Image: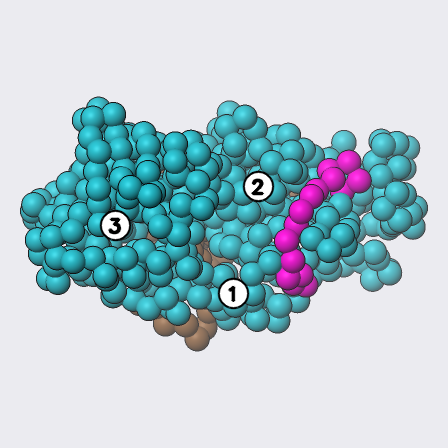
Amino acid sequence: MMRSASWRPSSAPKSRMPSAARTRREFLGLGLAAAATPFLPGRSVAQVAPKVVVVGGGFAGATCARFLHRDDPRIEVTLVEPNPVFTACPFSNAVLAGIREIREQRFDYQAVRADGVRLVQAAATAIDPQTRQVRLGDGTMLPYDRLVVAPGIDFRWGVIPGYTEAVTGRMPHAWKAGEQTLLLKRQLDEMPDGGLVVIAVPANPYRCPPGPYERASLIAHSLRTQKPRSKVLLLDAKDNFSKQGLFTAAWRQLYPGLLEWVSLSQGGKVTHVDPSAGTVSTDFEEYKPAVANVIPPQQAGRIAELAGVADRTGWCPVDPVSFESRLQPHVHVVGDAAIAGAMPKSAFAANAQAKICAAAIVALLRGTTPADPVLVNTCYSLVAPDYGISIAGVYRPRQGQLADVEGAGGTSPLMAPPGTRSLEAQYARAWFKTITGEVFGQG
Amino acid sequence: MTGTLVTSAALAADATLIASSCSGCHTRSDTLNTGIPRIRGLPEGAFTEAMRGFRGGQRQATVMDRIAKGLTDDEIRQLAAFFSAQK
């Protein structure tokens, strides 16, 4: 029996439909007319369009909404997103370093709407997986046949003692791009020469694994010419990090004496912050930086917990073929919120997962089984404006997880032919243009 | 549902499901110029030759060598057919 009871082919006898599903549908007011209506390609008879609601309009959610509509225009796709403008995180580190404008990070939803996606500018406040409805802030209920939860991340306040939401005005995280990015940039701009910049880095998993190291690099790049007596200190809650060999080699070459990484075993884990004293502490040291950038531990966006799709880790286990939640049927999770096996939490991965999820939902609504996908991730980091490095991976479902394909993927070579780093920096910018075009633009 | 329908739908889906990651870097847009080569509309032979070259190391790349190593011959053929059919 296929799992999408509501939109199975008419050839399946009615008696095979579980009575609970029938009750649910009747409760939703779809009635038996809908139950008897086939949803097959090429049918010209009147149909009740299946409803898919997507919660969250970032790289994952906006992609999924557009591709659901593109893959089958008969699906009624509603995208629930409270913000009229999306501010992209990739390349926001370049904004901090003053080599990019924040407006280049901002995207609206005009093209998404023009595609035929219904945009509801509101926050989802509750999800009832039993009756299959999403509740909005104003009390409106949106019924769904399939729900996509793509809320990105939220922060686990207080896990670093002293670091609460109220402290972010003083010690920004800047790990969701926007006002926080601008605040951190202002603090960096106002810092006198000779100042100490501390970046507190969390343990895995978190959004954008190489992001903190790119940030340290680009801040060091701007300090090198403008405030050369300053220093960037990475206080890390782990002993290894993404693209480590490439970053450390580049740091030695480009930023000697300007950038230092303190690993977990060297006492790098931040154990306490005191916003009024302006201090950041580890088990061994108390620092009083001019600028404190605290990237706190993270979890799936709150709505995932409310939907019952987050497990005890705070993240969402999913099926690697359909991205359907392991905890709630008919609910899919894509992007940073999902536990996607070996795939990192990146914008590239979110976009790739969302397209696979959209295709799977279309298949499920038609009563067919989604085919096994192949997914790719490519993450670029800038160590300097013309110095790019990358990590890539190819992933397939294996034993219920998205597993790394052995022999594929990996990082840019440590010893690269001349021109490689600047070419990868160009490709990084090209990637951003392509992906934001596909997600928010005409692409 | 009939067996034939499922089989052909599944086959058609396969190329799409592999190709969907590609447009993260290689734009589907006709108007956007990014600096990363466009692959839609590429002749089958050119696509297959490039991908095999990336995979085998005969063709220089920044990242495509690492990605091509994750695909089978059959998948490269499917992708070649898929992209060449897009105009």
- Which label sits in the foreground, 3 or 1? 3
Which residue in the protein does label 2 denote?
Answer: A302
Residue in the image at 24% along x and 57% along y: A188
Find the distance from the CA under tag 3 to the CA under tag 1: 28 Å
Q: Which residue is mark 1?
A: A85
Asked if marks 2 and 3 touch (Cβ < 8 Å), the reply is no
Question: Hey, what amino acid is under mark 1?
Answer: Val
Q: Give the camera-side residue of A190 and A130.
A: A190
**Marks 2 and 3, how far apart at CA:** 29 Å
Residue at numbered disc 3: A291
Q: Secondary structure at mark 2?
A: helix
Q: Is residue B31 above or below residue A390?
A: below
Q: What amino acid is at disc 3?
A: Val
Could you say which is closer to the camera, residue A89 or residue A187? A187
Q: Chain of mark 3?
A: A
Question: Which of the marked residues, 1 or 2, is nearer the chain's N terminus?
Answer: 1
Quarter of the rendering containing residue A307: top right
Q: Which mark is residue A98?
A: none
Up the image or down, A174 lies above or below A6; here it is below
Q: Do marks 2 and 3 share a chain?
A: yes
Q: Which residues are magenta?
A: A118-132
